[in-house]
Image (cartoon, helix red, strand yellow):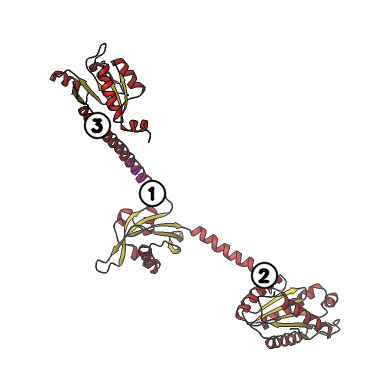
């Protein structure tokens, strides 16, 4: 820190004396001790200097020409900006009357001449210490008043929020067993009108009462233990719960630890819940429609592709087989040409329903693969199992005895089937299974149709 800063920090002193030797003596001594010193030789200069930059203390002589020290002090004390500057008189006048006059005018000390520098410094330091303490006290008082105002406004704000909030807000304190320390119930500390209405009581009837455990037993008894966990662990709790009251029945709450208790906010989400449930139902229907073939009402190609990917990953982990059957209605274009497209649609629907009845395991999937082609996905099924399914499909379709006079294969609708089976591997894509089944289906058609073929 430089010397100017040190002097500024030590104190800013204004010396007023018409005797130059006194000014020089005091100024040199105080400058050496680290004070910032200004000096003037008359009262009017003292007042002007003080107005330009108010000092921390004024050392003021009484006997001066034109304007004596008493008049200077009297002028300072009636000035709104200067009245708080401490004044120490330094005078050769040693009469009690002079001293009393000085103190009556507002002086804080009186030093008689001839003076000792040590005495002046000691009294100066004492007054500066008092001045600093007064400033600190004033600052503390200002801070205290500001804090009280903030506290008052905060309380008013909290009360306004509690009373106007559409959410239920409450604070509760744990009531513990004196012997075990376990929480037995919670005492209401703060309750807003929304909470009070839910309990069908007034706030005054709830404050200080133990009613939570009994109330929660009507909703869900485990909720009480969950709230105990909030207090004991400090982990917040957030969830929905069902409680019928008036036109409302669904609520959402957040509970957080507060001292040896918890604060809770409860919101009526009945309207939102109804919308969510309706949206969930609508989404489920949309999902079903998105994965369902519009004509046959079995799974569509999109659903098949997604299921194949999922089963491929699962069975690769489990190292279990996956079998695929691709099925094609023989000579279906001729069927449409002969009987018409409406009859063709009806034929596909009957075949799809037949396949759905035959393939019953939950993990199995029947899907319309495209046009008159269907795919049957058989997880956890070996090639032998797939052959049995293919034989059953072939025979059941024959048993439908759907007339097809233009087939050239038989007088009834028949199908050709391609079968492929393998244990999925993460190193290869499931397209290989489709490719093998498609090649087997092609072979079945080349061999005369109304049969199945295998390609591994």
Percent of width and height locating residue 132? 28, 34
Foreground: disc 1 or disc 3: 3
Q: Is residue 306 left or right of residue 227?
A: right
- Provide residue 452's location: percent of width, then percent of height: 77, 85
Disc 2 residue crowd, few under 14, some 14–19, many 20+, Cα 10 Å: some
Label 2: element kind: loop
Q: Judge whether 102 appears above or below 408 on screen.
A: above
Which SS type dominates the magenta stretch?
helix
168 or 262, which is in the foreground? Answer: 262
Distance in Å between CA atoms under marks 2 and 1? 51 Å
Residue for point 79% across, 75% down: 344
Q: Quadrant of residue 86 in the image?
A: top left
Q: Quadrant of residue 404?
A: bottom right
Q: Secondary structure at mark 3?
A: helix
Q: Is residue 53 above or below residue 178?
A: above
What is the spatial separation of the Cα atoms under label 1 and label 3, in whole angstroms? 56 Å
Location of mark 2 (residue): 291
Q: Which residues are magenta?
A: 148-157
Helix, strand or loop at disc 1? Answer: helix
Whole-angstrom CA distance, mark 3 to mark 2, is 92 Å
Residue identified by numbered label 3: 125
Closer to the observer: label 2 or label 1? 2
**153 magenta-colored:** yes
């Amino acid at each position: 820190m430089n010397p100017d800063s040190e002097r500024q920090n030590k104190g800013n002193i204004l010396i007023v004396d018409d005797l130059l030797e006194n000014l020089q003596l005091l100024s040199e001594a105080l400058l050496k001790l680290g004070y910032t010193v200004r000096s003037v030789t008359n009262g009017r200069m003292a007042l002007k200097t003080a107005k330009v930059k108010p000092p921390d203390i004024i050392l003021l002589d009484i006997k001066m020409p034109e304007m004596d020290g008493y008049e200077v002090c009297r002028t300072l004390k009636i000035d709104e900006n200067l009245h708080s500057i401490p004044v120490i008189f330094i005078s050769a006048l040693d009469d009690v009357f002079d001293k009393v006059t000085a103190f009556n005018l507002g002086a804080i000390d009186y030093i008689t001449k001839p003076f000792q520098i040590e005495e002046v410094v000691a009294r100066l330091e004492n007054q500066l210490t008092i001045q600093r303490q007064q400033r600190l006290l004033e600052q503390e008082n200002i801070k205290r008043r500001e804090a009280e105002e903030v506290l008052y406004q905060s309380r008013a704000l909290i009360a306004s929020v509690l009373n106007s909030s559409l959410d239920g807000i409450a604070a509760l304190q744990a009531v513990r067993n004196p012997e075990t320390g376990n929480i037995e119930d919670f005492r209401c500390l703060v309750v807003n009108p929304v909470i009070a209405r839910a309990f069908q009581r007034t706030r005054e009837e709830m404050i200080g009462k133990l009613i939570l455990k009994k109330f929660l037993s009507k909703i869900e008894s485990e909720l009480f233990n969950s709230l105990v966990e909030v207090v004991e662990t400090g982990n917040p709790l957030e969830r929905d719960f069902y409680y019928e009251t008036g036109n409302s029945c669904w609520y959402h709450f957040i509970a957080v630890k507060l001292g040896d208790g918890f604060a809770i906010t409860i919101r009526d989400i009945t309207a939102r819940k109804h919308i969510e449930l309706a949206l969930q139902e609508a989404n489920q229907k949309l999902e079903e429609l998105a994965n369902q073939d519009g004509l046959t009402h079995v799974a569509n190609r999109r659903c098949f592709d997604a299921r194949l990917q999922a089963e491929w990953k699962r069975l690769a982990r489990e190292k279990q087989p996956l079998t695929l059957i691709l099925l094609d209605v023989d000579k279906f274009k001729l069927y449409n040409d002969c009987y018409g497209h409406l009859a063709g649609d009806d034929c596909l629907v009957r075949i799809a329903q037949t396949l759905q009845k035959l393939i019953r395991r939950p993990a199995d999937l029947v899907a319309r693969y495209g046009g008159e082609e269907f795919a049957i996905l058989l997880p956890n099924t070996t090639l032998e199992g797939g052959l049995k399914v293919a034989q059953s499909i072939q025979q059941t379709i024959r048993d439908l005895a759907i007339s097809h006079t233009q087939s050239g294969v038989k007088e009834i609708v028949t199908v050709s089937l391609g079968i492929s089976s393998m244990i999925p591997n993460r190193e290869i894509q499931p397209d290989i299974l489709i490719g093998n089944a498609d090649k087997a289906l092609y072979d079945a058609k080349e061999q005369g149709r109304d049969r199945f073929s295998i390609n591994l």
